[in-house]
Image: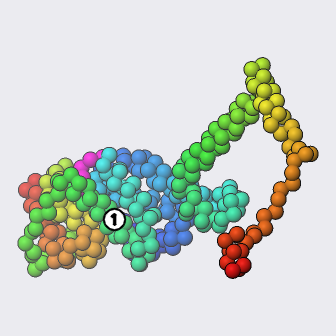
């Protein structure tokens, strides 16, 4: 004679290994969480970034993939920016062609001609200073 | 199954402190009874294992909501029961038929059921034939020997309803066992 409990437990006893595995996985996850919370690298990174460990764990760490993605984009932009700057320097540093040199010389010559002698000619009259005088009509009125 | 004294020795305070070894001990204690309960309700091995796992995870997450450490067992079964309900609701399988209350007919000492070896199959067959609410109450009564008040709390049903469900379930069981004597 058996009680209902004995019958039920005996019937489901074969599931015990699976239940053990299941229990171990849940407890292992719990262990991981506990160690994660107390992990040294996390606190080191937090202190390195200048934020508290709690802030790191609650704000940054859960979205670490997003932050990593953003950082990667920034690095990419930085690299692209640098490479473009380098190529611009290269363009400037290219040796001048003969045509360019010719046009440069022409422009230099023209400038020299334009600004060659800027001093006023020696025989030129000095500029007169204007002093207003009474008009003749006004003088006549006074004469009268 | 453990007596009240054993339940009091469960490492619930250590589990509250996040001690993995304490959780391991608690889960080890309840894994099989919980699986029996869940499996006999859903009748599917994989679903039963999944539900037990979900129950464990939810227990870790919500242990703060447990007020009395001594009620850990019924609290855990309550989570499992809710998980079963969620599963049925998702699948639209669950029909909770109400049974008229019969508290006057309730047997105060229903633990005298003893089943002979040749009746074991009949017992399991009957268990599977019982409507889910009755089966749930009967399993909680058999597996952990929870008091009616605890069963009422686990299943979130009034005490009178629990009494009547248990009464009808046991009546059916006795009938079958009497017939097959």
The residue furthest front is A144
> B126 left or right of A109?
left
* Position of the N terminus of chain B by quadrant: bottom left
Asked which secondary structure carries label 1, the reply is helix
Q: How is colour applied across the structure in the image?
A: rainbow
**Dominant secondary structure of the magenta stretch?**
helix
Label 1 neighbour load within 10 Å: few <14, some 14-19, many 20+: many
Outermost top residue: A98
Which of these two is toward me, B61 or B98?
Answer: B61
Among the 4 quarters of the image, the one containing residue A126: bottom right
Foreground residue among A131 and A67: A131
Quadrant hosting residue B163:
bottom left
Q: Disc 1: which chain?
A: B
Q: Is residue A91 above or below residue A129?
A: above
Span colored in magenta: B41-45
Q: Is residue B160 above or below residue A93?
A: below
Please give left or right for residue A97 compared with residue A137 in the image.
right
Name the residue beneath numbered marker 1: B79
**Residue B103 horizontal/vertical position (percent):** 12, 78
Number of numbered markers: 1
Q: Is residue B174 visible?
A: no
Task: Report x, y in % for residue A118.
Answer: 86, 43
Q: Is residue B44 magenta?
A: yes
Residue depicted at x 14% and y 75%: B106
Q: Quadrant of the C terminus of chain B?
A: bottom left
């Amino acid at each position: 004679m058996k009680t209902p409990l004995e019958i039920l437990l005996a019937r489901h006893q074969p599931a015990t290994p699976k239940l053990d595995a299941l229990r171990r996985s849940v407890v292992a996850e719990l262990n991981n969480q506990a160690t994660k919370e107390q992990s040294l690298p996390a606190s080191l990174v937090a202190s390195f970034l200048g934020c508290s460990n709690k802030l790191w764990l609650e704000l940054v760490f859960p979205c670490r993939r997003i932050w990593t993605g953003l950082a990667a984009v920034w690095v990419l932009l930085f690299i692209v920016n640098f490479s473009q700057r380098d190529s611009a320097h290269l363009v400037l540093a290219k040796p001048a062609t003969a045509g360019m040199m010719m046009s440069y010389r022409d422009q230099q010559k023209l400038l020299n001609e334009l600004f060659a002698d800027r001093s006023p000619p020696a025989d030129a009259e000095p500029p007169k200073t204007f002093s207003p005088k009474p008009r003749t009509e006004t003088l006549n009125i006074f004469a009268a | 199954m453990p007596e009240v004294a054993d339940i009091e020795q469960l490492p619930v305070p250590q589990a509250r402190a996040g001690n993995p070894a304490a959780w391991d001990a608690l889960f080890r204690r309840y894994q099989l009874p919980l699986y029996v309960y869940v499996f006999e309700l859903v009748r599917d091995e994989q679903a039963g294992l999944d539900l037990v796992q979900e129950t464990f995870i939810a227990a870790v997450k919500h242990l703060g909501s447990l007020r009395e450490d001594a009620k850990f067992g019924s609290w855990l079964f309550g989570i499992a029961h809710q998980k079963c309900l969620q599963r049925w609701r998702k699948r639209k399988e669950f029909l909770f038929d109400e049974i008229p209350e019969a508290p006057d007919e309730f047997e105060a000492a229903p633990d005298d059921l003893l089943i002979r070896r040749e009746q074991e199959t009949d017992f399991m067959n009957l268990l599977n034939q019982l409507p889910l609410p009755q089966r749930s109450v009967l399993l909680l009564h058999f597996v952990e020997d929870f008091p009616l008040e605890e069963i009422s709390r686990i299943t979130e049903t009034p005490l009178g309803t629990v009494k009547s469900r248990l009464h009808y379930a046991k009546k059916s069981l006795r009938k079958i066992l009497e017939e097959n004597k």
